[in-house]
Image (cartoon, helix red, strand yellow):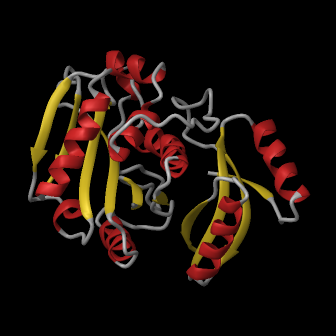
Amino acid sequence: MKIILTVGHSILKTGSCTSADGRSFGGVLEYAYNKNIVYQAAAYLQSAGHQADILICPELKFGKSTDEREYKLSRVNSGGYDLVCELHLNASRFHNARGCEVLYKSEKGKQVAQRILDRLTTVFGNRGVQRREDLYMLNRVKPTAVMLETFFCDSSDDCALAEKTDVALLIAEGIHGSHISLTPDRPAEGLFSSGMLYRVQTGAFTVCKNAEALKKELQEKDIDAFITVADLGKLFYRVQVGAFSVRKNAVNMQKVLRKAGYDAVIVRA
């Protein structure tokens, strides 16, 4: 299955984040948390035989939150994907709600939503699957689509559960539909900090098919690689490996890649 995992929200030119922020209530910043786990979720899906790409909005690029919409829709709808899964965290008006819910629109989306919910509710409270017709990432995309509200970012209890749980694995297993036995090295710390990780970049291309070719070449050598899109006046398709919270782990991966004959530089996510 060809899957794209998208992270909801962005950081605007002003530096403000468009996501919910639960840190004042003993929780986490929604955007940073999901940005942290999305690479690991993709790695798990790749280990199960899927093609899994990632889409994160560029930071300090947009003037308003609505700019996120067209940026994501154009890329999701032109990629030939079977499934788009967007990661969010919930928040409540009085900061007293808990649990997980998964949103969908189509019947195929409902099936995927239920599978993901079944895995996440082994840890978090069950708020059910919900059909929604008012969300652009459900009603304006070509692939089957689901949107996760994995837990409440302003609930210290939910966040405590998330901190000791491999949430990325639960999401991946829900999408896959069964247990995933291969478990790539996931960051052991940092999920509740700034959301910044180390990755190793092996190339940046203006032509997507060139990035796809390098990604495929690396995967054939059992190196998990991802493509991320950067808008720097023109689009660059960056081939990157890993999501490390400890820099020395990124350095070790850099050495592996250089030994295999690839250019490799460490970048911060």
- Residue at image coords 42%, 36%: 29
Residue 237 at x, y percent in the picture: 59, 73
* Number of on-image labels: 0
Residue 53 at x, y percent in the picture: 48, 61
Q: Nearer the viewer, residue 245 or 82?
A: 82
Q: Nearer the viewer, residue 239 or 231?
A: 239
258 is higher (above) or lower (below) than 194: below
Q: Nearer the viewer, residue 212 or 141?
A: 212
Residue 191 at x, y percent in the picture: 53, 32
Residue 152 at x, y percent in the picture: 28, 29
- Residue at image coords 39%, 22%: 159
201 is higher (above) or lower (below) than 163: below
Instruction: Decide if residue 88 is on the left or right side of residue 101.
Output: right
- Residue at image coords 40%, 60%: 3
203 is higher (above) or lower (below) than 4: below
Instruction: Decide if residue 176 is on the left or right side of residue 102.
Output: right
269 is higher (above) or lower (below) than 205: above
The quadrant of the picture occupied by the N terminus is bottom left
Which residue appears farthest toward the right when viewing the image?
259
- Specify the quadrant of the image occupied by residue 136: bottom left
